[in-house]
Image (tube, rainbow, N blue to C red):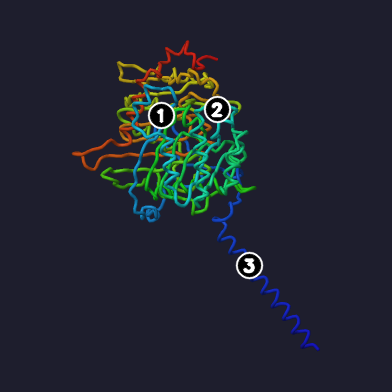
Amino acid sequence: MGTKKTMQVTSKFHIIGTISMIWLLAVAFMLFLRPVILPPVLNLGLEKEEVVIYGPWDNERFAEEGQPNEGELEEEAVKEEAWSYNDSCKFNLVESIPQDLPYISVRSAAQPLIQSWMELLDSAQESVHIASYYWSLTGSDIGTNDSSSQPGEELLAKLETLLARNVSLTVATSDPTLAVNSTDLEVLMSKGAQVRKIPMKYLTHGVLHSKFWIVDMKHVYLGSANMDWRSLTQVKELGVVIYNCSSLAYDLEKTFQTYWVLGIPGATIPKPWPQNYSTNINWHHPLQETFDKMVTTAYFSASPPILCPRGRTKDLEALLSVIWGAEKFLYVSVMEYFPTSRFEHPVKYWPVIDNALREAAFNRHVLIHLLISCGKNSDPSMFPYLKSLQALTNPQTNITIEVKIFIIPVGNHSNIPYSRVSHSKYAVTEKKAYLGTSNWSKDYFTNTAGVGLVINQSSSDPQHSVPTIQDNLKSIFERDWQSPYAVSLEELPGQQDCVWHA
């Protein structure tokens, strides 16, 4: 009898032990897969974030606690797997020119945006990933019956055909959205698209302001255009399409995945990000290759810092590096320029970019031209800041900061709200080009999700040189600068299509 009870107890222990072992293995397996299939659920806001302090007049950068700077990556880790791709990267500028702008429409060094987008979708064979602030591709979204909405509606129809061709469509967008009446995403989801709305207001106190595509993990679009029909016919936009470049496509996909994983209900921002989100393509170690006799260096940046996994260059650092590197000229085209916060209360002074521009003009005598947009919905409180910059100009000491305001005539398009404006966000020097998705004020770099591309090109055959991306971007800027739509600050009073006074 005693032996029987002992065997029963032993059997129970065996069963319990087996169940415990299975449970432990299951937990270990889930922890192993966690970075891949689940959003890392870690603390947000309780630990001290990495803080990068910029000296007011120099280029010194100091990192306080948190992740190491990109330059601190171990040398052996710099062997980025992306460089193993057999790439033939090609970089093309693309732009959208509003209707009824004849001077500009016949003088372009870029391909039409809608043409590039349609060609990318036609070429897609496996997948299309899109990050966009909001979606509004039909005129009915804003209660407008206008023929200029047709390209947007055709684009939406083209996106629907992807799913019929067995091409997956994955979308990350901001929540809440500006386009409250749009049904674009519901239409696409009904066809099989995967959509996640990222609660950036809760996560970072900002929005998802990025605008990029990744097609078949080898083609990329990045630029100022939202998924909005007005971006195709009523708003001036500029971006770049990168063809046959898996190394950069896979690298930008890592940023897309930082959004995607945060779209799961209850997700919080991990600190640090898991290793599979990190990159070795950055400011200190850019992609460096020769493509079609063009020596090219390039890397992506991201904002805000809390969405930058290990190795990712912060967007502000990328932009400042371009300004700091300028020796001859710096041309800037951006919709809004404020050396302050825009969406904080009370407003905070933030002269980081402003100081970098003043230092470039004053200490290095860099010729600076700023082309800032103004329309019916612009905030005129930015003009005193621009006048302050321009006031530094002194021909006798070779200091030049010149500002012009780009105003697109409304004409017979007054029925279309939030249009007829230049939405571009780029800078170009004799050395590099920066193309981004952010306006130039504090919030866009500290709280808002955005991306940037820094690129430099030079010909490997000086005897048969072709224009670099810097050359083409400079040409576009000079075309706009010299156009009748660019007016000086002194000419602003009386401009009927610009809100130039409070």
Q: Are marks 3 and 2 in contact (CB under 8 Å)?
A: no
Residue at coordinates 39% horizontally, 35% vertically from top-left? 94
Location of residue 89 in the rendering, given as x and y in whole percent from the top left corner:
34, 46
Of the two numbered discs 2 and 1 in the rendering, the one whose residue sits closer to the viewer: 2
Up-down relation of residue 494 to residue 279 (above or below): above
Location of residue 466 in the rendering, given as x and y in whole percent from the top left corner:
25, 37
Secondary structure at numbered mark 3: helix
Quadrant of the rendered image containing residue 93: top left
Would residue 273 be visible to someone looking at this image? Answer: yes
Residue 414: mark in rendering: none
The residue pinned by badge 2 equals: 342
Q: Amino acid at mark 3?
A: Leu
- Label 3 Cα crowd, 10 Å radius (few <14 / some 14-19 / many 20+): few
**409 or 140: which is nearer to us?**
140
Residue at coordinates 23% horizontally, 38% vertically from top-left? 465
Classify residue 498 as left or right of residue 462. Answer: right
Q: Amino acid at mark 1?
A: Ala
